[in-house]
Image: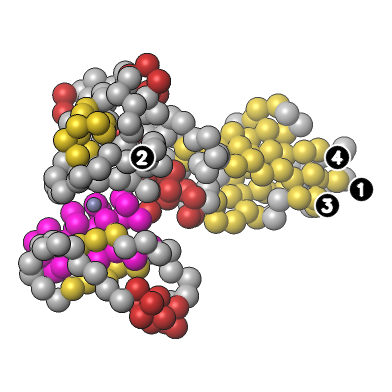
Amino acid sequence: MDRIICVDQEKVLDVVSDHFPQYDAILVLANSSRSGGASLGNNIITSAMSKNLNQTIIHELGHALANLGDEYTYGGVDLPTREPSNPNLTLNEYAYNVKWGHWLDLNLGQASIGVFEGGHYLEYGVWRPTNNSVMRTLGQPFHAVNLEAWSLALYRHTGTYLNSVPDSGALQQNEDGQTFEIELTLGEEVQSIEWRIDDELVTPQATNRLFVPAQNQDYIVQASISDSSQVIRKDNNQFSQDTLTWWVSVQ
Ligand SMILES: [Zn+2]
């Protein structure tokens, strides 16, 4: 097809594995100003160096990273034989049990979530969550359903935190007291932490840092990390949540 850019996937994987084996996704840029791109599997996406470059990358990463499906309605012939795995496409036209039902109360003009017919290259028989998103037309926002899928995919790759000091697990109390610190992956603007000492909620000195003065008996510190951006409402696999536990013994 005219606007699909394909590559020799084996060759691409060879080159990237040699030079950057820790890759998450691969973008191949075609030295052409004619708009086009593709998501080819194996986390390879392509784009031309067109004026739509940024939008094309977002759209193709929507496929490769977040498993979003195309919401446009041309080029298709046959209905999918079973429910698409994509979070933004369904064969189920009924709002009461549609898979993005937890967003249906969002009623904000063009961002309103509903059950809109057309998607997956077909005009009829497949439904999408918004009238128009970047998975249908370049330049449009993701909107809530796609953004949730994108955010969960991001957490799936990054985890909720980079490290903690000290490492979670068992440790001996410091005689001057103990500081617990967590480096969040996305930061405290979109992530929050609930700190507990022996199951009691406590207020930390900073979102990601708790100091406990020297105690005279063993205690347990727990830090529960969650996403506070409000773009995630349903996280069945708990990609955006973690609980760290430290068992502190006092000799
Ligand atoms: Zn696409």
- Give the residue type that dot 3 points to: Gln
Query: Which residue is denoted by mark 1 in the rendering?
Result: 251
> For numbered disc 3, what is the local secondary structure?
strand
- The residue stretch that appears in magenta: 43-64
Q: CA distance from mark 1 to mark 2?
A: 64 Å
Q: CA distance from mark 1 to mark 4?
A: 8 Å
| Left or right of 170 in this view: 241 | left
Please say whether residue 44 is one of the residues in the magenta stretch: yes
Magenta highlight on residue 67:
no
Labelled pair 3, 1 in contact (Cβ < 8 Å): yes
Q: Nearer the viewer, residue 237 or 124?
A: 124
Residue placed under numbered mark 2 in the picture: 81
Classify residue 100 by image quadrant: top left
Q: Which residue is mark 4?
A: 218
Quadrant housing the N terminus: bottom left
Quadrant hosting residue 121: top left
Q: Quadrant of residue 202?
A: top right
Number of the label disc, if any, that sits on residue 172: 3
Pointer 1 or 2: first along the chain: 2
Task: Determine the CA span between mark 3 and mark 1.
Answer: 8 Å
* Of the image marks 3 and 1, the number of the one nearer the N terminus: 3
The amino acid type found where label 2 is placed reads Thr
Question: Which residue is drawn at the image coordinates 36% and 80% (left, top)?
Answer: 11
**Figure check: 213 above or below 101:** below
Where does the image place residue 245, in percent across and percent down from the top left? 71, 43
N-terminal label among 3 and 2: 2
Label located before the other in sequence (4 or 2): 2
